[in-house]
Amino acid sequence: MAKTVLITGASSGFGRDTALLFKKKGWNVAATMRSPEKAKSWTGPASLFTPRLDVTDRASMQAGIDETVAKFGGIDVLINNAGFGLLGPLEGASPEDLRREVDTNLMGVIGMIQLVLPLMRKARSGVIVNVSSLGGRMTLPLFSAYHATKYAVEGLTESLQYELEGYGIRVKLVEPGGSKTNFDSSTSMVRTPHPAYQALIDGFDKMWAEQAAKLPGPEKVVQAIYRAATDGSARLRYPALAFPFLTIRNLVGARGWSAIMKMMVRRMR
Ligand SMILES: NC(=O)c1ccc[n+]([C@@H]2O[C@H](COP(=O)([O-])OP(=O)(O)OC[C@H]3O[C@@H](n4cnc5c(N)ncnc54)[C@H](OP(=O)(O)O)[C@@H]3O)[C@@H](O)[C@H]2O)c1
């Protein structure tokens, strides 16, 4: 019998391509998203099931899960993928920006896990894949709020593995590096400007644009998500596109990385 995966934030990027890969592999797929009507051009031909689900709205999360269970009979794999970035100085972020960042990237993950756990515990099996980021293992300037959420997802997942192991439920972290998706758009990368930091913002934007032009597509990340969900192992972390940032960070250690970042920021100012 086909297994069932529920993916959050499946309207574009990693979520969309992961939904299509699972479908191709014969899974039942609930490709959940905030606005299923926006995705008709590609979900229609793929005949994907697309429940509406906003990870900042608990009732919509429960409804998306209930619809999936009603259609497929259960949920074997949950992929917490929905997320967006706040880019800019922390001082420029409004309380609303910050709340939405935490509500989406952290509370959304926690809420989805809480809601699927009763199902998985009853079935005594399940896999939960949290799409974190290399930004959950190392930091760049101007991403403090985003890093705060991704570091939190790392700690959350690492701790959860201990309490869920006894119920046959495995948790996983996929840690993507920069990849060409919709993430760089104005909906997924919300800017928090502040005039006092303009020189740093300009310098960072220049570097970011150079990096963005060279970014690889999402394939390696999507493969890592699929592997994490299906390899049957107890492995926790799946970095993807780790080179160059995480590779260098691991080589030079925390102090070495901070020194490199500080030097870069001094040059930008
Ligand atoms: N691309 C990268 O370089 C990169 C690197 C590291 C980590 N990541 C992580 O990968 C994940 C996916 O990002 P992506 O690169 O695939 O970017 P993306 O193409 O912009 O996809 C982000 C998805 O999240 C959804 N989303 C945002 N807020 C939501 C909410 N409240 N409820 C439900 N869905 C919501 C978006 O839906 P809408 O269409 O409704 O906005 C979209 O489907 C994120 O968690 C991101 O932090 C990305």
Image (cartoon, rainbow, N blue to C red):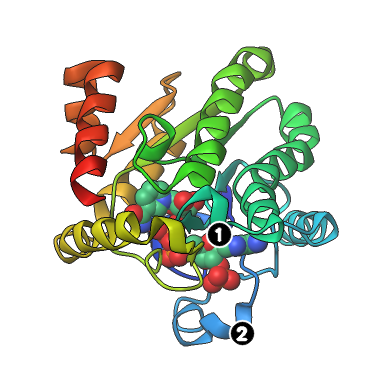
Residue 198 in view of the camera: yes
**Residue 4 falls left or right of residue 229:** right
| Residue in view at x 40 percent, y 41 percent | 133
Q: Which one is closest to the eye, mark 2 or mark 1?
A: 2
Total residue callouts: 2
Res. 83 mark: none
Q: Could you tell me residue 59's position as x and y percent?
A: 85, 58
Q: Look at mark 2 in the image and give the residue it sits on.
A: 37
| Residue 20 appears in the picture as rendered | no
Observer-nearest of 148 and 178? 148
Q: Is mark 2 within 8 Å of ligand 1?
A: no
Residue at the extreme front of the image, as rendered: 196
Q: Tell me: residue 202, above or below residue 171.
A: below
Residue at x 23% of width, y 25% of height: 259
Residue in the image at 57% along x and 36% along y: 128
Q: Amino acid at mark 2?
A: Glu
Residues tagged 2 and 1 counted as in contact (Cβ below 8 A): no
Q: Residues within 10 Å of mark 2 (few under 14, many from 20)?
A: few
Q: Which mark is residue 29?
A: 1
Q: Does 252 appear above or below 238? A: above
Instruction: Give the amino acid type for the residue marked by disc 1 in the picture.
Output: Val
Residue 170 quadrant: top right
Foreground: 207 or 78?
207
Counting residues from the start of the chain, the first of labels 2 and 1 encountered is: 1
Rendered image quadrant of residue 42: bottom left
- Measure the alpha-carbon separation of dots 2 and 1: 17 Å
Residue 165 lies in quadrant: top right
Residue 176: horizontal and vertical position, in percent? 34, 44
Going 22% across and 50% down the picture, which residue do you hit?
268
